[in-house]
Amino acid sequence: MIAFSAAAFAFFQQDNPPDGSALPAASAPLAQHGTAIGEILHNSGPVAIGVLILLALLSLFSWTVIIEKSRAFASARGQSVRFLRAFRKSGRLSEVAAVSEQFKPSPLVDVFNEINDEYQRQSNGRGHPRNPVGLERAAATASSEALTVMEQRLTWLATIANIAPFIGLFGTVWGIIDAFHGLGTAGAASLRAVAPGISEALITTAAGILVAIPSVVGYNQLTAQLRDFGARMDDFGRELLNAIENAAAFQTPASPSDRFSTQAAAEPRGRSY
């Protein structure tokens, strides 16, 4: 694009006087308008306006997703800290289950509920689980489902980041076509004939880049947080399984099976928030 502009500028300089003076009639409008985006938009054709409107809508949608997901992830992170603190202080699974819904939307709650439900189905809340592998599968399923919910609409950010520059490029190509068409119908090689088309080309290209950059940054940041949530859910699932196994191993026959905090306190904990 820069090479094309330089070539066009060199070509149109052939109309200048040999003494090196530059188009006096064009210098005044150039100095007057400068980088006036409003003037460029006013002179843009319907195709360029349509491209800019589409890019504006994509930008609005991408920023909406970024802001909503950032707030949701911050809330989930804070509730996870509170839930993990309550879990480690509690002495019974039933106590944690009774208050777990208070810590939504923490994904750790989903992992706990899934493991606890599977444990209740297997052993009725007493003794060793009959199928420890089933508890591990329940934990993996809960983590996968929670991540699926959290990553909804994130793929739109990746899509917008990929297609926005091409939409801007379409406006660029159309602007160049319009510039050459104006050059052919004007009957003379002048900057005035091609300036509107070149302006459309440049502004749509810039708009496409401006839409793509925040989408790329937002997608990368949010997916990194998703990976962190996934690791934390895996750690919590292992911690809960260890607590259940230790409580079942050290309990007396008459004691409730869901007492686990005393035996699990000595176990290494997962990563802290």
Image (tube, rainbow, N blue to C red):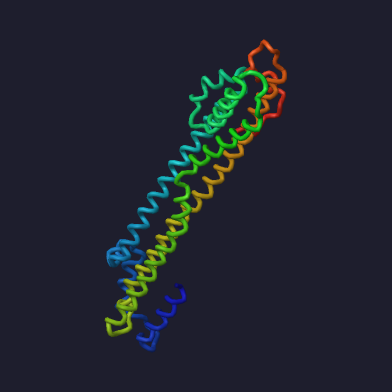
Drawn side of residue 124 relative to residue 51, left or right: right
Drawn side of residue 105 relative to residue 174, left or right: right
Quadrant of the rendering where the N terminus is positioned: bottom left
- Residue shown at 56%/18% (left/top)? 95
The correct choice, above or below, for 15 with respect to 46 in the image is below
In percent of width and height, residue 200 lies at 35, 68
Query: Is 58 or 5 nearer to us in this picture?
Result: 58
Quarter-of-image position of residue 164: bottom left
Quarter-of-image position of residue 34: bottom left
In percent of width and height, residue 254 lies at 67, 10
Quadrant of the rendering where the C terminus is positioned: top right
- Residue shown at 38%/64% (left/top)? 204
Q: How many marks?
A: 0
The correct choice, above or below, for 81 with respect to 54 in the image is above
- Residue shown at 38%/53% (left/top)? 58
List the single residue furthest toward the bottom.
Answer: 18
In percent of width and height, residue 209 lies at 44, 60
In percent of width and height, residue 2 lies at 46, 73
Query: Is 149 or 11 nearer to us in this picture?
Result: 149
